[in-house]
Each structure stands twice: as C-alpha cells, then as structure tokens.
Image (cartoon, helix red, strand yellow):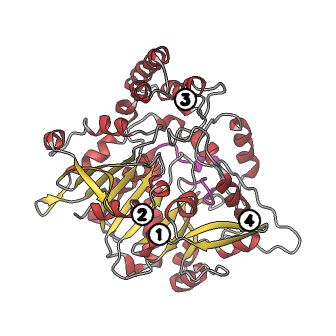
Amino acid sequence: MLCQAFVLLLVALCAQCSINKYPRIPVMFTNQPGDDAGSPLVLTDYIEANKTKEGRNLSQVVLPDVNLTSYAGYFRVNATADKKFNSSLFFWFFPAEVNASSAPVLVWLQGGPGASSMFGLFQEHGPLVVSKTNGSLSLLKRKIHWALNHNVIYIDNPVGTGFSYVQHPDQYSRNESHVGVNLYVALKQFFTIFPEYQKNDFYVTGESYAGKYVPALAYTIHINNPVAKTKINLKGVAIGNGLCDPLNMMVYSSYLYQLGLIDENAKKLIEEKEKKATQLILEWKWDDAFNEFDSIINGDFNKQSTIFKNVSGFTNYFNYLVPIADNSSDVLMQDLFKNATFRKSIHVGDAAFNSNDTVEQFLKQDVMSSVKSWIEILVNATESNAKQYKILFYNGQLDIIVAYPLTVNFLKTLDWSGKNAYANVSRTIWYHNNDIAGYLKKVDNFYEVLVRNAGHMVPSDQPERAPELRETKSK
C-alpha cells in the first residue's frame, strides 16, 4: 500500500543521526501464516458515499479484556487528481467516560517531528497501557487518564507519522501551513462521523514539536470558522514544553551552565553556536541554522556527537535527573504494533508504523522557523469584548531540550494586549494535595505554568497534576 522502498531508503539514510528523541520504532508489518490484520479503514470513503453511520460502526475498536469504548481509523486528507496516490491521518478517539455528551473535546498531537501520538496514548495520558506478563502482551486500563472526563482524539501527525501514511513523497508536509490544513481537513471529517460532539468546547493540545502543530491547527480553525460549513467550537490551546519560536528560544548555554552540566569553556562554545544559529534564522537560512542547533544539542542529523553529549555524557535531554533514558516501554509498544489481532482491532491493516526520520527530513527547513505570529493572533483574538481563546503554556521543571527558561524567553517577546501585564504580574504557587505542584502566571485567559518534578513529558512524570492543568485554564 505504501511506498515502502522510498520510506526504507530515507530511514536508512538517517539511521545513525539521532542521539535522542521520541522512540524510533519503525514497524514494517507482514502477515504471517494464520494472521489476519484486516485492511485499513478509510472513513472518508464512507463520508463520500453518504454512509457515515456504517463507517462509524465499523470504526469501533473491540479489545480483549478491556471494557472501553473507542473508535479508530483513517481520514484521507490529500489525494492526486486521479486518486492514484493519497495520504491519510490515523486517529484513535476515546469518548469521555463521564458526561461525554457535554465534555470538552481534546485533540492530542505528539512532537518529534514525526513522533506518533500513540506515545502519548500509551505512555503519558491515554486510558491504555501495554503490559507484558510471562512473555504475553496485554492491554490494561490506566487509572488516571484524560478520557475520564474529556473526549480525546489522538492523531498521528503529520502524514507519514506512526500509522498515518503517504503514498507519494510529494505528499509529505514541508511546513506548518500544510500540517494545519491536513489536520483541519481530518477534523471536519471527524465531526461528520461524530456530529454530536461538534458543539462541545474544543481544545488543541500537544507537547514538544507540537509547539508548532498546535498553533498551526488552531490558527487554521480560527481563520476558517467564520465561513465554514462545519464549524469547530475552538476554545483554546495547551502547549507543553513546546518548540514555538527557535529565534528566541536558542538560549541553552546559560541554562546548562547554571545546572552545572557544562563548564565555562563549553558555555562559550555553545554561545558562539547560538549566535551563529540566530543570525542564520534572521537570514532565513533554515538548513544552516538547523545544523548549528543539531550540533549543540538536538543531534538528529549530526553524524558526530553533540556538544551537550560530549561534555555532559547525557544521551537523554528530556530530564536532567535521568542521563540515560529507559526505553523498555518503547519495546512493548513495538511488539504490540506487530500484533495482527491488535492491528485489526484498530483498523490499520498492514500499514507500516513509521518513526521520526522520514517526516523530519521533509520538515527540516521548518524546524528553525517560528509560529509566533499565529500565536499572537490567537492570544489577541476577541469575541464579545473578551479574549476569545484560553492559551496555556506549561513546562516541566526538569526538561532540557525545551526548558522553562527557553519558553519564558519566547513568551516575553509576544506582541499582545497583555504583554506589559504579563511582564509585571506576580507568579503564584500552585498546590496539589498540599504539595507545591508548581507555579502559575495568569493574565486574562493567558497562562504560563511551571510543573515541579517533571521533565519533557509532564503527563508521564506527574500524572495526577497534569489533568489539573486543564482545569487551571478555567480558574
């Protein structure tokens, strides 16, 4: 079904690039004797044939030993005129366990670029976890998860990520405008299949490189809603440890030095690299700027070790208390995605599960660009003389790659009506069960939160506190 040879070629070219990222677990599935993985369920075909109820029924997910209602399948978002090649986004939808008819709808977007939202589902805040007992895989129910009181849509984004697929290289996203439009096209189809949720409050959420995806989708909804037949009731966005504006977030040297992870010599070297990277960004030399960033800490396409790894010994930049990450959960996910019965249950058939590399190759020139202007439009938008959207930025205290000081440095540069108030407002202490959970700054509907004792993946590190972040937006 896919251009597998093309995908494998790019994966091979990038195989030794990264020192650290979301799990790189590409799975090329082949039916074994006796296996039945079914076929990919493209709900777009049912919408076009005016058979939405049939498509919805077919998309229901039935999992052994798990009493949980969910739906999964594909929305086609792009196709050539002759429909010979198309690209589709994979989604997995979990209606809220309590008051689904009125609960807010959240879409979750993973970062990367090229990281599957199945990571967020299984390892951060979804209702399912993968377990292995006596050599046998099983799915268990997570006690604290976001779908308890929210309708949650997990989407593998952009096309070519996770179970989402492309059939021609021209269909890969190369910028955030393309990402935003594809997601918007998918969501319009989602609300066609599930129209009872269209009037519910809708929030766009995500972490890491989704600091680009979240504003891209929210902005696309914002500019299309006034004339759209299918209106999406956008109420706000939540971005966790998000890379939004590299120009103003290229400040690793002082942060790493204050943590004691680098000395003055390394600090000076990184400062020189940062100055060079920011100048290249100002000159719109995206590839060159990325290469400088890659050599400092990112390490995705840098064939040599990064400066950060060389001087600190760290191979993990998601938590400065954990120099080497535990990837055992990634292996369990990989085993699950090879299972034909599971694949048939979520309606992906024999589709490959793709990891970061290929998608990031096509988005390389996007990495050092900014979505700051879109965020400014969203934060300045008004409706009935009040701020139209709730905007939440949250950061784990222990992150390195998109650390709290980087986010604050960017937020201070936003041009919006509350800029001066934000600069002067006092930070308040956020308590959870009598513990200091973090710190909050609030101006109108704009929130900046630091979460204590959490790294890059806040919902995973602080599962009890993370759900309260959503409630913070309405306090």
Q: Of the two numbered discs 2 and 3 on the same chain, state the one appearing first in sequence.
A: 3
Say which amino acid is labelled 3. Answer: Asp
Res. 143 in view? yes
Per the image, the residue denoted by label 4 is 350
Say which amino acid is labelled 2. Answer: Glu
The quarter of the rendered structure image containing the N terminus is: bottom right
Residue 304, x across and y down, in percent? 65, 24
Q: How many numbered callouts? A: 4
- Which region of the structure is painted magenta? 159-175
Tag 2 and tag 4, C-beta contact below 8 Å: no
Secondary structure beneath label 3: helix
Residue 301, x across and y down, in percent? 62, 32
Tag 1 and tag 2, C-beta contact below 8 Å: yes
Please rate how many residues cluster around mark 2, counting C-alpha atoms within 10 Å: few if below 14, some from 14 to 19, many from 20: some
Secondary structure beneath label 1: loop
Secondary structure beneath label 2: loop
**What is the spatial separation of the Cα atoms under label 2 and label 4, in whole angstroms?**
36 Å
Task: Give the residue at x 43% y 30%.
Answer: 259
- Which of discs 2 and 4 lies nearer the camera? The answer is 2
Q: Is residue 241 magenta?
A: no
Q: Is residue 169 magenta?
A: yes
Say which amino acid is labelled 1. Answer: Ile
Label for residue 464? 2
**What is the spatial separation of the Cα atoms under label 1 and label 4, in whole angstroms?**
32 Å
Per the image, the residue denoted by label 3 is 294
